[in-house]
Image (cartoon, coloured by chain):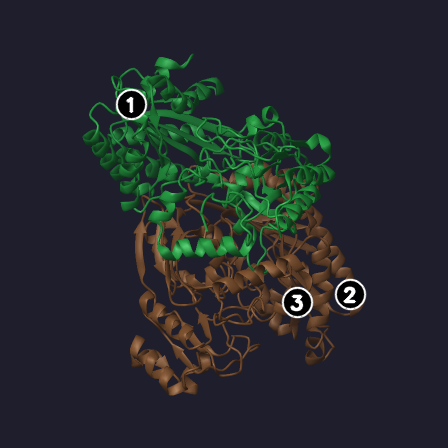
Chain colours: A green, B brown
């Protein structure tokens, strides 16, 4: 089958979704062709915005027939270029934002069924109005979409307790490469009838199929919460503290975030309405949050007791417990602003690694030594989800260095940091995925067996290679 | 490639695992060739018991080279014939029970790494000794093995809180059809580097690869527990009670099991040391258990309050709270003995269906009406994991009917019950899998797209069709 010429393709797309949902003007398409940090800029033959699963199906059937490359896109918040086409101008961007209907809320089944284009914040809100919690929570929740969250197996700040996006799904609806619809919108907690096909499509970044709908798990809404900001001398003590609070408070820990002194200094220096909550500076901090679905648990006193024990054992040097929601929000702001605050300190080289939680202290120790030895004056800001073993080992440039000269070393520092993570049984992409950014690096470090398995899956599900090609894995 | 003759095959297998780990004598093989209820009896060329992953790898390489069928087997406790070969006598049974080493316990990572042949009970015990919980729990836990649990995505009594077996796994080691080893023994809570290959092998019943090792999640050990046995008038009230206890007690509910009056009567009539815990008979009962990883939560008073509220609202007619572990065990025995007790009442036709939790009352109502209309005198005993929507809709024969005449209607009643479950968005195999028992039925009721996707996965991962063929899906 030869490729259709562009006007014929546009005409066919318009016949499927209507004129107003097909865009070919460069200005119209521009916001959808650039990743928000500007790292990836692509081109496209058209941007198409279907409103229904049947429209997505018809678009894929057309694309399959004509060997047209399709790049699925949600809220365009991904950090690895998965949602941006290449620069050939041949791809069509299939943006799901018009598929934004809530299909069903079933409080007796604790499920929420949505179109893929519903934003994460909208899904959270629907859950909240039904006196339930949809626990996925991450920085871009106002604009990212459920389809993108699931396609990238998003992580965020509640993984410790609720798991990754993958763990929050009971059913999926997926349009396959050739336009067939796999109808898997089941709301079942147990279903062992054959291979669990939905798992294929989660975390595969739109390279095996296009998620158009999902049945999500809901949880009891939290009714009590306790938040503390704790200072301690090193990450070893932070891991011991995590397990000792767990021993005291059971599964109530919903967040356990590690921060270094330099991160707090950057935030309080550059971000409005932030201040250091503890008097005496400390090399490391932890933000810990407990929550419970019952109002009867006295989480604050549980956490107080656990922290008092930890202070007696010299695990913790100081701590403040939030006395109100406002105080808790102020503590969280220190953590949430940490990535942005680094923008004010020149170039920043990012990492999104994970290691077993037990190996986090060793990872941080080795990675700090390695980057300091490599570039004196470098300012590492390792912070993040210690409870999941997921550390954003970000590196701010030396104060006096030229930013571009520092950023030129991106791959160099990636290699240093990733090598150490891998030696400790870790991952080079804990929650952001592979996309374009880490495709070749992943291919180089995975075993041949693993890469061959991935390639064979890609070939099986996308034989013509039209679904988000050259993302995650090249065939 | 032609098939080796049998003596040559045996010699090669012996060269891999040693003479003492290859069995060809019919008497030696007999216990491994029959499913415990006697529904499936197979034959085999040999039974081989490798002790290491490398031995499994060498066996599969040999089998691949010689087109030899391999049936992987764990504790031989499966209920759908997945672990039993056909009657051709050509297969080799690859039994994993000698691979029973605990590889690692990492309490700071909350992980347990084991060989596939470790029994579930042994894994639970290792966790307990480390002051942790491995929450998978089911009737055959003394003999079933982790490899089988994961290959079948086992369910059990704690799914409501902890999820199915699939949800309890961080990493896998798998031997592929051609003998290559996929090394995925990662202990990471977050890892988004490419397709999540481990998901392929869980729940696929040994048809896509042989699981030889796993990294399992551990949880804080429960420190407090509350157990109640509650009488109520119908399943609608049971679902309302579930959500109202959840509203009061949050995520602390770890079990919520439904039982009918007839089930309690059968248990107390036939099982030693059981008695009806409530004075006034009631059409339905629920066993509810809360548990918490902290000793500070007063779960008993929380549950008492929730039940008092429910009584005021006329959801519940009576209730007893266990005052000791002994009392709790006695209440659990009523539930756990329910399947066995039916053996004393003649033939029993089993179902393992699930529907959305919200649909359980409608399912029970419709299925009861349908089977009563079909066969007056039939004695349905619908019981099970209401909190997961998983009801074992078992049917005891009419008292006066001949057992064999009743059991001849197995497929007939399956059809009646499964049709209703499917109409309500349910599954015909909630936790037991497909194996041989439900293969053709599954193929008939799934969509063409779904069956084709499953077949294409099977062909991709097992191109020669030597891995547990004719189980789950025929290609």
Q: Mark 2 lies on which chain?
A: B
Of marks 3 and 2, which one's residue comes earlier in the chain?
A: 2
How far apart in space, not on screen, are marks 1 and 3 (Cα)?
63 Å
State if disc 3 and disc 1 touch (CB < 8 Å): no
Marks 2 and 1: which is nearer the front?
A: 1
Determine the CA span between mark 2 and mark 1.
76 Å
Q: Name the residue: 44% across, 77% down.
A: B68
Query: Which percent across, then down, holds residue A234?
Result: 25, 31
Q: Name the residue under label 2.
A: B372
Q: Which of B350 and A397 is in front in this view?
A: A397
Label 3 CA crowd tier, 10 Å (few <14, some 14–19, many 20+): some
Viewer-nearest of labels 3 and 2?
3
Q: Quadrant of residue A159?
A: top left
In the visual, does B199 lie left or right of B402?
left
Residue B314 spot, x, y in % from top left: 70, 42
Q: In this view, does B199 lie above or below A369?
A: below
Instruction: Give whichever of B57, A108 is nearer the camera.
Output: B57
Is residue A70 placed above or below A125 in the rendered structure?
Answer: below
Q: Can residue A229 be seen in this view?
A: yes
Is residue B234 visible in the rendered structure shown here?
Answer: no
Tell me the subunit letter for badge 1: A
Q: Residue at x 62, y 57 (%)?
A: B450
The disc label shown at residue A397, or none: 1
Give a yes or no on whether discs 2 and 1 share a subunit: no
Residue underneath mark 3: B441
Q: As drawn, is A233 to the left or to the right of B235? A: left
Position in image of residue A21 (x %, y %): 69, 32
SS at circle 3? helix
Q: Are marks 1 and 3 on the same chain?
A: no
């Amino acid at each position: 089958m030869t490729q259709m010429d562009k006007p014929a393709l546009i005409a066919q797309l318009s016949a499927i979704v209507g004129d107003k949902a097909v865009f070919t003007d460069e200005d119209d398409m521009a916001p959808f062709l650039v990743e928000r940090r500007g790292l990836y800029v692509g081109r496209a033959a058209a941007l198409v915005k279907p409103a229904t699963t049947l429209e997505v199906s018809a678009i894929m059937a057309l694309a399959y027939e004509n060997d047209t490359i399709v790049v699925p896109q949600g809220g365009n918040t991904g950090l690895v270029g998965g949602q941006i086409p290449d620069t050939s101008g041949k791809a069509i961007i299939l943006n799901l934002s018009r598929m934004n209907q809530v299909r069903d809320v079933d409080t007796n089944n604790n499920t929420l069924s949505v179109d893929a284009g519903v934003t994460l914040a909208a899904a959270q809100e629907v859950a909240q109005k039904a006196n339930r919690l949809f626990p996925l929570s991450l920085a871009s929740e106002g604009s990212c979409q459920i389809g993108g969250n699931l396609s990238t197996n998003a992580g965020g700040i509640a993984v410790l307790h609720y798991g990754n996006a993958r763990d929050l799904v009971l059913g999926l609806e997926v349009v396959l490469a050739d336009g067939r619809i796999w109808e898997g919108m089941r709301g079942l907690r147990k279903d062992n009838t054959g291979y669990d096909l939905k798992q294929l499509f989660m975390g595969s970044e739109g390279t095996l199929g296009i998620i158009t709908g999902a049945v999500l798990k809901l949880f009891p809404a939290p009714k009590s919460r306790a938040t503390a900001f704790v200072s301690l001398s090193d990450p070893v003590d932070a891991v011991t503290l995590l397990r000792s609070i767990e021993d005291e408070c059971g599964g109530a820990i919903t967040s356990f975030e590690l921060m270094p002194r330099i991160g707090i200094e950057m935030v309080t220096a550059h971000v409005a309405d932030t201040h250091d909550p503890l008097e005496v500076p400390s090399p490391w901090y932890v933000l810990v949050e407990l929550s419970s679905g019952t109002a009867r648990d006295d989480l604050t006193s549980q956490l107080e007791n656990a922290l008092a024990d930890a202070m007696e054992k010299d695990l913790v040097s100081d701590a403040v417990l939030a006395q109100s929601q406002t105080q808790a929000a102020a503590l969280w702001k220190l953590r949430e602003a940490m990535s942005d605050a680094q923008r004010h300190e020149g170039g920043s080289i990012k990492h999104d690694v994970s290691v077993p939680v037990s190996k986090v202290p060793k990872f941080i120790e080795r990675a700090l030594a390695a980057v300091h030895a490599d570039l004196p004056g470098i300012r590492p800001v390792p912070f993040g989800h210690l409870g999941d073993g997921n550390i954003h080992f970000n590196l701010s440039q030396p104060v006096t260095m030229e930013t571009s000269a520092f950023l030129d070393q991106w791959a160099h520092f990636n290699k240093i940091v990733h090598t150490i993570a891998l030696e400790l049984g870790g991952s080079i992409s804990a929650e952001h995925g592979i996309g374009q950014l880490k495709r070749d690096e992943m291919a180089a470090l995975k075993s041949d067996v693993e890469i061959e398995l991935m390639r064979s899956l890609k070939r099986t599900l996308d034989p013509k290679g039209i679904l988000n090609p050259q993302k995650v894995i090249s065939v």
